[in-house]
Structures are given as C-alpha cells and as structure tokens.
Amino acid sequence: MLDLDGVVYIGQEAVAGASAHIEQARDAGMRVAFITNNASRAAAVVAEHLRTLGVPARTPDVVTSAQAAARLLADRFGAGSPVVCLGGPGLHAALEEAGLEPVDAEADAVAAVSGYGPDLRWREIMHVAVRIRDGLPWVASNTDHTIPTTYGVAPGHGVLVEMLERFTGITPQVAGKPARPLLDETIRRVGGRRPLMVGDRLDTDIEGARNAEVDSLLVLTGVTGLAELVAARPQERPTYLAADLGGLTDTHRAPGRDETGWHLGGWSGRVEGGRLVVEQTEAAPALDDWWRVVAVASWEHQDRTGAVPDITAARVPGTGRATR
C-alpha cells in the first residue's frame, strides 16, 4: 500500500526511480495499491495522474479516503441512503460508487460526510455544521492539517474538521490515516497475505499501519528527515526503513546491540551525553544501514530517558546535511 505524495511523486514530478522500483516489486510477486488521504479526486483521476508520471496504475489499484468513508456509511446505513456530501468530486463519486445518494446540505439525509474541496462555499459549511450539531451522524474522510499546492503548503481538510468539532462538540468517525478504515478498505479491495504500508509520514502512514496492525516501510523521499525520525514516538516507528522505494525488494537487516552501542553493515551508533554519535567502521557501508542504526540508537535513548537525542553534530553521509 503506497502512499502517494512524498513516496511515488512530489508535487507534479515522480520521485526519482519510483516507477522502476514499483515494477521490480510487481515482478517479485507483489500486488501494488496506491492509497491517499486526499478525498477530492476520484480513483480514476488519480490513476490517470500516475500514468502521466510514468507509473503504470489502473483505477482498481487506487483507494482513497473518500472510498473508505463511503464504505463506512454504506455498511452502517445501507445502499440507497441519502448522505450530505460536503466535499469535492472525488467524495461525490465515492458515494455513488458505494450505492449511496449524495445530496446537498439542505436535503433529507441519514448522515453527512466531509472531505477536502477547494470550491466549498461557506453557506454549505454553516448549514452542515448546524445539522451535525443537531444530531446528524458525521464521517470525515481525513484529518490532514495541510495539503501541498502549486502555491505552497495550504490548510487541509483537518482544519475544517477542527472548526466543525469546536462548533458542534462532535468528533467524527474518521476514514483516512492514521485511522484504520482506509487501510482496511485497501486490503478488502486488493487482497494480499502480508499487507505492507509504505509511506513518508510518521503521524499518518506509519501510525496508521500500527493502528491497522500491519507492517510498515518508511521511505525518506518525503517529509521525514533526521530530526523527525529520531523524535518518533513508539506508535510512529516503522517496521522497516529505506531511503526510497528500492527498499521494497531489498533485504532489511536489523542492527545488533552490544555494550558499545548499535551496529549494522559498517556503522556503529550510540547516544553519549545526550548526543547522537554514529561512526563508520568499514569501507563503503550502505546508507540505509546508517539510517537504521540512527533510528534504533535514538529510540532506545528516548525510551530510557524520555528525551530526544541531540543531533547537532550528525550529518547524513554523502550529503553533509543534518536534515535529509
């Protein structure tokens, strides 16, 4: 289960090597699904976008938080039920796909569902807010606070959810990551004996995998860098870690511990006096092994002391940078 932004593409460009790594995974017998918390676009639109980036994808390969939200509503209220749709075309399409009837804010309905929609009108939001406060059941596609745009990082659907919660006093049922319905819906649609969530965000992708009780692979092509990794809370820590999607077909060795620290593939790491120290012990060690040593040494220190280690002196090998 591949998250999209930061894993398969960044903005309007494919992540370097992503298409080739996905094909290698498929050749190795893996079934690939593309999943997204963004409820504004229909699955067919997302699949077409992926194809334009050189990533082969069919509509059934894509699962959105809108589809997961529609599943929750269909299971609860049954086919044909009218649902107030406060969102974009992707949410509307998902309701219809699930056999539900999308209706406007003033129509009779059994529930309301909300999702990201850049063209939503304040009048619609106000009307739905009043109906939720007065008892209309509410499902939110996701609670992402930000969304990437061509003009920068902008407020996401989570900002609207917070506002509605403050006004209504109601907490919605959430479909998207880190809640588990999106991953459950993906597994239901796509199948697979050993599901693996692949993402770049600790607080949605990795925490979502833990909530769904499946393994996870963190890739470092998106928002997570050194500072975020060493500060990961227990529920945000991945099963596997790799620089990019090449990690799908690599063997992942675990670091070993002795009295001097953690060791793997030519790297040795420990926290001394609260400061992270990583040393190279062999020629040309793998970069992924550096990240794995950093992770376990930092998390051990955090769990023992409650403090995140100081990474001031740490530099990612080959980059000279402290963040990526």
Image (tube, rainbow, N blue to C red):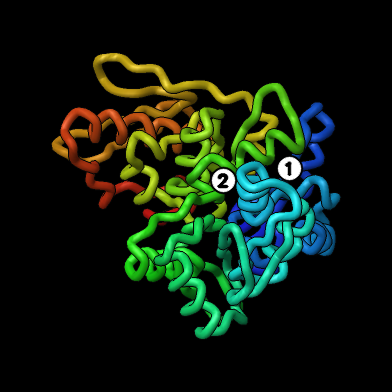
User: Circle 2: is it few (<14), some (14-19), or many (20+) Cα within 10 Å?
Assistant: many
Residue 169 located left or right of residue 265: left
Q: Which residue is mark 1?
A: 33
- What is the secondary structure assignment of the residue under circle 1? loop
Residue 193 located left or right of residue 201: right
Q: Earlier in the sequence, mark 2 or mark 1?
A: 1
Q: Which residue is mark 2?
A: 199
Q: Quadrant of residue 246?
A: top right
Give the amino acid at mark 2.
Answer: Gly
Q: At 81% from the left edge and 35% from the top edge, which residue is drawn?
A: 26
Please say whether residue 150 is visible from this viewpoint: yes
Residue 43 located left or right of residue 316: right
Quarter occupied by the N terminus: top right
**Which of the pair 110/57 is nearer the observer?**
110
Q: Residue 22 at x, y = what percent? A: 76, 42
Q: Residue 104 at x, y = what percent? A: 64, 74
User: Circle 1: is it few (<14), some (14-19), or many (20+) Cα within 10 Å?
Assistant: many
Q: At 71% from the left edge and 34% from the top edge, which residue is drawn?
A: 188
Q: Residue 315 at x, y = what percent? A: 37, 49
**Which of the pair 63/152 is nearer the observer?**
63
Q: Residue 70 at x, y = what percent? A: 66, 52
Q: At 57% from the left edge and 58% from the top edge, which residue is drawn?
A: 111
Give the amino acid at mark 1.
Answer: Ala
| 2 or 1: mark nearer the eye | 1
Please say whether residue 15 is visible from this viewpoint: no
Between marks 2 and 1, how big is the CA–CA gap? 12 Å
